[in-house]
Image: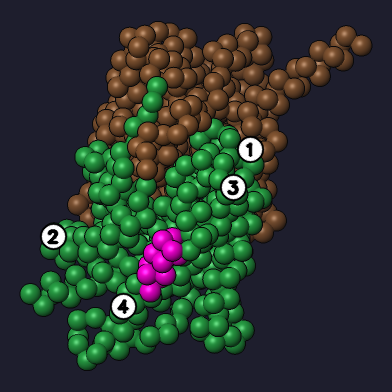
Amino acid sequence: MELFTNQVLAGIATGAIYACMALAVVMIYQAIDHLNFAQGEMAMFSTFIAWQLMQWGVPYWGAFLLTLAFSFAGGIAIERLLFKPLAKAPILTNVAGFIALYAIINSFAGLIWDFTIKQFPTPFGSSPFLGSQLISTHQAGMIGVTMILLVLLFFFFRFTRIGLAMRAAAAMPESARLVGINTSWMIALGWGMAAAIGSIAGMMIAPVVFLEPNMMLGVLIYGFAAAVLGGLTSPFGAVVGGFLVGIFENLAGTYIPGIGNELKLPIALALIIVVLVVKPAGLFGRPIVKRV
Amino acid sequence: MSTVQEVVTEAPAIEAVPKKAMTLGYGTSLAVLALLILVPLFVKNFIIFQLTMLLIYALAVMALNILTGGSGQFSLGQSAFYAVGAYTSAILMEHGNINYALTLPVSGIVCFGFGYLFGKPALRLSGVYLALATFALATAMPQLLKLGVFEPWTGGVQGLVVTKPDAPSFVSSIWSVFSGRAMSQDMWLYYFTLAVSIGIYVASVNLLRSRSGRAFMAIRDNEIAASAMGVDVALYKTLAFGVSAGITGVAGALGAIAVQFVAPDSYTITLAISLFLGMVVGGVGWLPGSIVGSAFIIFVPNIAEGISKGLSGAVFGILLFVVIFLVPHGARQVAVIAQQLIGKLRKS
């Protein structure tokens, strides 16, 4: 029983990271109807920025905030420069654009910081949390940071003017334009926020998976799985999906024989395919009805 | 919130490519063929090997082109089919002692089956969802190949070493009569690959011109209209997936024979991205562009790595953006522009 509780708690902790990634993916999907295959690489790059700042002597939380600001600006810049001109292009062109972005960021990170594995510090320490053996303080910290982030986002999207405008722009772009919302900038803002959320996920997971240019590939696939499970049209679903996928991953690894770390990615693949086949809209997504 | 999409006309998966624009004329085809036959006679073995890889990747890119340019479906997971083809061939050769040439059709059939089965669930997916599922397939493939269960056959992380075939004795004896030298393994493999590639290219061109090919294109341009015309959308979509996977499998098998080695980490998402890139550069839906795309993905990384290690990804990405923004139809557009220029020069 203790093993079970332990695994569930550990699952919630990694699930928090998947939830962040899924949320970042869904935010961009809502804004432009495309999946950002470079989301993981963007987060990885941000994490390297944070690492570099700390190497230069900036304290952890200072580096954290600076990285958030950098990612936000970077996300907006990428949208303005590269993806705004592609808004009307066929899906293929957009997918190619994301793949290109993936290759560029991955390669540049390798060029600047090389491919050796680096330690990333945790601000929470890794001693047992509140004296219990079940969960470490870093895992508790991961859950805590995600929760704070989610509450902030909830209030932002529900009660602020700009948050409401962003939702309107995503749900009904044409009507939103008619009431005077600058939908184009709302999309850019969505990119910026997605990049910032991704960078939080990167900085939180880096002490666990270690910092290197390919560290986010697995996390991204799980983020996709979470987003698909929760429904690509539902930010709330993405978060729930993230936690579910995290718990599922840990329990499957513990209780199903033959599934260890080496089958991590195939599990995510199986999960994505099963959800897409059984319930393509996900748990909380709206099925899309098309008029022909 | 309405559940009906506000905008009725959605962006197409890819821009429609007219059927005639998908292939080359006879004259140009023969010229390219003559070039492919003659060039290896005058170059060193290492370059012959690179030319063999050029043909192999061209096959894989063309397979993706049939899927995307023909039926309008995406795949970022071609590396998975390539890997299955390579492993099938390597296992048959090393454990079954089967002749290398006979392993090719087996690889093709195995991959056709794999692609067809993967296409079944993927049927319900379109556009980005399909890209997502295949992306996950490509990332998961190396881990699947490393599985302990298959290790007696696949060799696990170590991979398998494949013996390079010699030219058959009658070919090498004819060859030595003409040139006075024995035919090198590389050269034999090149002509073998060339023969297979031409066979598959001709078959693919005919496929796209046939009833099935027209069905693919109808689905690509408008799925609903296609089904209204009586096209069995589900069948043809999975069929396109199967054919594409089958050709990729043959390419993978040839690749395993040429490189003489298969290992899980040769078939990562990077390979899938390269093949995708090759298709975009060569021009989506233009089959001859596959060889241009293939040349791009083989020679550009070499040049980039020469400048700085690890640079090839960045160069790939930046060039991909250049292609997207400047020549969205890839090599086909360049070819058309060149043709017009030549036409103008002749007139004046």
Contact between marks 1 and 3 (CB within 8 A): the answer is no
Find numbered disc 4 in the image and state the secondary structure of the residue it sits on: helix
Q: CA distance from mark 2 to mark 4?
A: 25 Å
Instruction: Residue A24: say if magenta.
Output: no
The image shows residue A207, relative to residue A191, as above or below, that is below
Q: The disc labelled 3 sits on which kind of residue?
A: Gly
The residue carrying mark 1 is B324
Find numbered disc 3 in the image and state the secondary structure of the residue it sits on: loop
Residue shown at 51% from the left, 84% from the top = A60
Parent chain of label 3: A
Specify the colour of chain B.
Answer: brown
Q: Residues within 10 Å of mark 3 (few under 14, many from 20)?
A: few
Q: Position of residue B207 (x, y in %)?
A: 43, 13
Extreme residue toward the bottom, this view: A131
Q: The disc labelled 1 sits on which kind of residue?
A: Ile
Q: CA distance from mark 3 to mark 4?
A: 44 Å
Span highlighted in magenta in the image: A148-159
Instruction: Tell me if residue B164 can be seen.
Output: no
The residue carrying mark 4 is A139
The residue carrying mark 2 is A257
In which quadrant is the N terminus of chain B drawn? top left
Q: Going from the N terminus, do you reach mark 3 or mark 4 first?
A: 4
The residue carrying mark 3 is A180
Find numbered disc 1 in the image and state the secondary structure of the residue it sits on: helix
Q: How many marks?
A: 4
Parent chain of label 4: A
Q: CA distance from mark 1 to mark 2?
A: 46 Å
Parent chain of label 2: A
